[in-house]
Image (cartoon, rainbow, N blue to C red):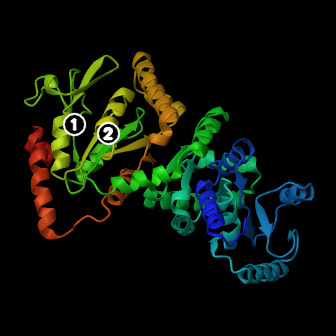
């Protein structure tokens, strides 16, 4: 067939349309989170290709050995293969300067600085893989570069944050660094940077499509998660996020006991009603000292479990949500927040409000840490009950993790928790009209809904003083 003919060009166009583009999976996380483990699984078991990065730092002895054996180690030299070894400081400084100039000469458009060294990727290499239908994985710990990659590859890109241990727990971090072979000095330097990297995640939580909780011992659950990730539809993920930005929201917080669900609602109360108001649940269980305005109990003036059109059981108690009121709030432009950890209730809400639900999973203490904390001041029977609740939420996360829009990592700092929630809500308020008359109108309506369930807590003048 004549390559200049109209039919040939039409056939070529059809072939190009049918050709499936690959996806780019970005992996970020603090030191010791397991980024390389995640990348290795995606490459070895999911047929992804790993994008090597150019580096100016000296190669480590282990890397030199692996390279000489023909193993791909994920990094490329900008000028030969270099290991500074025991060279004098002045010579090391000179060699570093030469490498950095060689790096700059490459004119790599996707680059960043880490530990005063330069790292970069070839855009053409990434694009060629994707255009040929290959899924690619890239490890990036620079927020600006993550944002650039998402802008460049848009619907073909998924950004994932990997979390294993809270960097505030220095003992665990140092133990991981020791196992990796770091010197005490390099481990301390990595630790200080890990704290900063975690803060960057807190401030840019909405930039990540998924958070991979690498908190299980063993590889089985992690492998299944990455299998699900590799099979996910990137364009569908980005389209859903775009749709959700145009409507008021129902923020649903999910998590195991001790994760910080109650604290999340506390930050929303502190935040007042400008971004979201709490949607209370009715329940037939007895009130606990820790319960606030988010729960309505028998004997409360507004208690009406029978009127709730969404009910579910949780550990022997019945909980109910007034769906009609949720819908009325949405129609009035008001966003709501509530806590649910029951799969059937979550599925029903998603079916009722497919474009308004934002699922937020809160991760706090590990199961072992939580058990130790509870046993310090509670009886064994209650601890076992709470651990069952922990297992239930844990199972819900691992079975449904792609359905969670965001994961909050609660490090025990209430201000940090509030910041993460604020950043999520502001992401979904993109394009909001902040003119004074619009905001005043919103506040007036939101105040009416909020006052409906206001519960006065009695106090004495001495308690206030």
Residue 70 location in percent, x, y?
A: 90, 56
Q: Tell which of 91 and 154 is nearer to you.
A: 154
Res 253 quadrant in image:
top left
24 lies left or right of 177: left
- The residue drawn where x is 21% and y is 68% is 434
Res 184 quadrant in image:
bottom right
The answer to which of marks 2 and 1 sits earlier in the sequence is 2
Residue 12 location in percent, x, y?
A: 64, 62
Is residue 58 visible in the rendered image? The answer is yes
Q: Quadrant of the N terminus?
A: bottom right
Secondary element at tag 2: helix
Secondary element at tag 1: loop
Q: Tell which of 33 and 249 is nearer to you.
A: 249
Instruction: State the residue position of label 1.
Output: 292
Mark 2 → mark 1, Cα distance in angstroms: 9 Å
Residue 170 location in percent, x, y?
A: 59, 50
Q: Tell which of 69 and 125 is nearer to you.
A: 125
Q: Tell which of 435 and 349 is nearer to you.
A: 349
In the depicted structure, whether residue 139 falls above or below residue 370: below
Q: Residues within 10 Å of mark 1 (few under 14, many from 20)?
A: some
Is residue 30 visible in the rendered image? The answer is no
In the drawing, what numbered circle is on residue 263? none
362 lies left or right of 322: right
30 lies left or right of 413: right
Instruction: State the residue position of label 2.
Output: 262
- The residue drawn where x is 65% and y is 32% is 220
- The residue drawn where x is 12% and y is 26% is 304
Find out whether the residues at labels 2 and 1 contact each other: C-beta distance under 8 Å: yes
In the depicted structure, whether residue 385 falls above or below residue 19: above
Residue 134 location in percent, x, y?
A: 68, 54
């Amino acid at each position: 067939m004549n390559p200049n003919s109209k039919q040939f060009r039409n056939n070529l166009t059809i072939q190009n349309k049918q050709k499936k583009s690959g996806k780019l999976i970005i992996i970020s996380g603090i030191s010791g989170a397991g980024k390389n483990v995640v990348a290795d699984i995606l490459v070895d078991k999911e047929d992804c290709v790993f994008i090597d990065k150019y580096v100016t730092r000296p190669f480590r002895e282990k890397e030199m050995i692996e390279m000489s054996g023909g193993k791909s180690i994920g990094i490329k030299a900008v000028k030969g293969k270099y290991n500074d070894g025991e060279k004098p400081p002045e010579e090391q400084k000179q060699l570093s300067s030469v490498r950095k100039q060689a790096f700059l000469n490459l004119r790599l458009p996707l680059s960043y600085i880490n530990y005063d060294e330069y790292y970069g990727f070839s855009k053409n290499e990434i694009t060629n893989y994707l255009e040929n239908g290959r899924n690619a994985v890239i490890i990036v710990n620079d927020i600006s570069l993550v944002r650039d990659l998402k802008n460049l590859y848009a619907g073909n890109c998924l950004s994932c944050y990997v979390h294993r241990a809270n960097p505030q727990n220095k003992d665990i971090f140092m133990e991981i660094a020791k196992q990796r072979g770091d010197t005490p000095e390099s481990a301390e330097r990595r630790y200080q940077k890990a704290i900063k990297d975690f803060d960057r995640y807190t401030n840019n939580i909405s930039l990540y499509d998924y958070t991979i909780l690498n908190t299980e011992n063993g590889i089985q659950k992690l492998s299944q998660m990455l299998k699900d990730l590799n099979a996910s539809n990137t364009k569908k993920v980005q389209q859903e996020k775009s749709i959700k930005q145009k409507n008021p929201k129902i923020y649903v917080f999910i998590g195991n006991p001790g994760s910080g669900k109650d604290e999340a609602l506390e930050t929303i109360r502190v935040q007042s009603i400008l971004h979201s108001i709490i949607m209370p649940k009715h329940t037939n269980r007895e009130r606990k000292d820790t319960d606030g305005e988010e729960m309505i109990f028998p004997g409360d003036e507004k208690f009406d479990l029978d009127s709730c059109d969404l009910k579910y059981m949780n550990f022997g108690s019945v909980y109910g949500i007034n769906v009609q009121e949720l819908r009325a709030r949405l129609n009035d432009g008001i966003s709501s927040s509530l806590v649910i950890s029951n799969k059937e209730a979550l599925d029903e809400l998603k079916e009722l409000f497919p474009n308004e639900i934002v699922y937020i999973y809160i991760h706090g203490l590990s199961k072992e840490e939580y058990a130790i904390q509870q046993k310090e001041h509670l009886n064994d029977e209650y601890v076992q009950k709470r651990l069952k609740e922990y297992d239930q939420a844990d199972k819900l996360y691992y079975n449904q993790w792609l359905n969670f829009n965001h994961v909050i990592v609660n490090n025990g700092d209430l201000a940090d928790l509030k910041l993460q929630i604020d950043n999520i809500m502001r992401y979904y308020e993109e394009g909001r009209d902040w003119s004074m008359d619009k905001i005043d109108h919103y506040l007036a309506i939101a105040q009416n809904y909020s006052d409906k369930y206001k519960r006065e807590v009695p106090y004495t003048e001495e308690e206030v003083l």
